[in-house]
Image (spheres, rainbow, N blue to C red):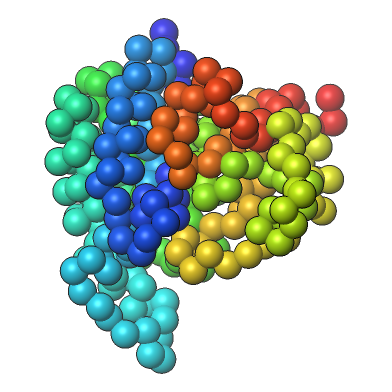
C-alpha cells in the first residue's frame, strides 16, 4: 500500500514572484507529482483562488474587505481549477475538486464522508485538489492560507507526511529577510520553542506566515505525522527535497513529550 502525502501549495508559490498565477510553476508541480506517484498517494491542498480571479477581474475592497475577497474567491476558484485541469491533464493527471471548511472536521459523520470521498478518488488515481470554501467560510482569508486546513486533511487521511510549500526554504534562526546571516534549521523537535524564532513579514500575497505553518506542524506532530517546510521558488523543489538535494526544515513526527 502506498504512503499518503499531503502537499500544500500557497499563493506565493503559485504566483512565482508575480501577482498572477504562473502556469510554469503549475507545470513544475505537475511534473513532481507525477514523479512521486509510484510511491505516494498525493492530496494537493491549494490556495490561489483570489490570485486567479485577479487575472480576470478587479473588485474593490472598499468598506468590506472580507466580503469582496469572498467574491473574488468565488470567481477565481473555477478559473484556478481550469488551469490545474489543463496543465495537469498534459501529464495524464486527473483532478477532482474538493471545497471544504473546518466544519467538515467537527463531527464524525462529516469527517467520515470526507474521508470516504478522498479515499475513493485516490483509489481511482484521481488527484484531489482541496481548497477552503471561501464563499461560506472566511478562516483562510483571515487567518491561515490553508496551512491548518492541510494539517487537518493530513490527520484525517492518516498521511505519513505533510509538505508545506512556502516562499521561504524553512525555519531560520532569525528572519532571513532582515538578517543575511540567518541560518536554516534542518530539523525541529520542540515546535513550541521554535515559535520564539519567528519574525513575520507580510508578503502581500498569501495570508499564511510562519506561525500558521508551525501550528500546522504541531497539529501533525501530535498525531505522529512528519511535516516539512520547503521553499517552492526553484524548480523541482519537492523531488529535490526527497533526494536531499536542497535544504528545508523537517519537523519530527515524534509525539510531543516523548
Residue 34 is drawn in which quadrant? top left
Q: Is residue 155 visible?
A: no
Above or below, comparing residue 86 to residue 236 in the picture: below
Residue 50 is drawn in which quadrant? bottom left
Q: Quadrant of the C terminus?
A: top right
Instruction: Specify whether 162 is left or right of 220.
Output: left
Q: Is residue 234 visible?
A: yes
Instruction: Specify whether 181 is left or right of 118.
Output: right
Q: Quadrant of the N terminus?
A: top left
Q: Residue at x 37, y 84 (%)?
A: 61
Query: Which of 171 and 161 lies nearest the eye of the viewer?
Result: 171
Query: Where does residue 72 sit, x and y in percent of width and height?
Result: 29, 70
Query: Which residue extends farthest top?
Result: 1
Query: Where does residue 216 sit, x and y in percent of width and height?
Result: 61, 44
Q: Residue at x 21, y 34 (%)?
A: 88
Q: Residue at x 53, y 32 (%)?
A: 162
Above or below, comparing residue 256 to residue 52 in the picture: above
Q: Residue at x 40, y 86 (%)?
A: 64
Query: Which of 234 and 197 lies nearest the eye of the viewer?
Result: 234
Query: Which of 156 and 189 lies nearest the eye of the viewer?
Result: 189
Above or below, comparing residue 61 to residue 15 in the picture: below
Query: Which residue extends farthest bottom?
Result: 63
Above or below, comparing residue 121 to residue 111 in the picture: above
Instruction: Specify whether 218 is left or right of 207.
Output: right
Query: Where does residue 112 sit, x and y in percent of width and height?
Result: 41, 34
Query: Where does residue 38 sit, x and y in percent of width and height?
Result: 35, 12
Amino acid at each position: 500500500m502506498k504512503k499518503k502525502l499531503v502537499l500544500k501549495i500557497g499563493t506565493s508559490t503559485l504566483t512565482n514572484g508575480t501577482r498572477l498565477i504562473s502556469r510554469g510553476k503549475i507545470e513544475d508541480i505537475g511534473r513532481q507529482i507525477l514523479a512521486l506517484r509510484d510511491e505516494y498517494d498525493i492530496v494537493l491542498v491549494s490556495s490561489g483562488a483570489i490570485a486567479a480571479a485577479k487575472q480576470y477581474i478587479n473588485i474593490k475592497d472598499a468598506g468590506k474587505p472580507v466580503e469582496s475577497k469572498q467574491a473574488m474567491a468565488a470567481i477565481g476558484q473555477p478559473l484556478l481549477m481550469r488551469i490545474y485541469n489543463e496543465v495537469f491533464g498534459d501529464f495524464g493527471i486527473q483532478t477532482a475538486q474538493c471545497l471544504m471548511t473546518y466544519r467538515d472536521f467537527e463531527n464524525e459523520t462529516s469527517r467520515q464522508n470526507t474521508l470516504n470521498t478522498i479515499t475513493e478518488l485516490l483509489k481511482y488515481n484521481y488527484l484531489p485538489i482541496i481548497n477552503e470554501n471561501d464563499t461560506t467560510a472566511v478562516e483562510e482569508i483571515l487567518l491561515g492560507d490553508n496551512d491548518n486546513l492541510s494539517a487537518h486533511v493530513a490527520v484525517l487521511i492518516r498521511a505519513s507526511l505533510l509538505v508545506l510549500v512556502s516562499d521561504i526554504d524553512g525555519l531560520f534562526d532569525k528572519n532571513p529577510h532582515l538578517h543575511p546571516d540567518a541560518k536554516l534549521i534542518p530539523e525541529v523537535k520542540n515546535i513550541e520553542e521554535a515559535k520564539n524564532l519567528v519574525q513575520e513579514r507580510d508578503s502581500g500575497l498569501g495570508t499564511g506566515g510562519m506561525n500558521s505553518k508551525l501550528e500546522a506542524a504541531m497539529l501533525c506532530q501530535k498525531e505522529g505525522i512528519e511535516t516539512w517546510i520547503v521553499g517552492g521558488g526553484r524548480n523541482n523543489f519537492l523531488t529535490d527535497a526527497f533526494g536531499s538535494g536542497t535544504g528545508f526544515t523537517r519537523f519530527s513526527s515524534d509525539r510531543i513529550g516523548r
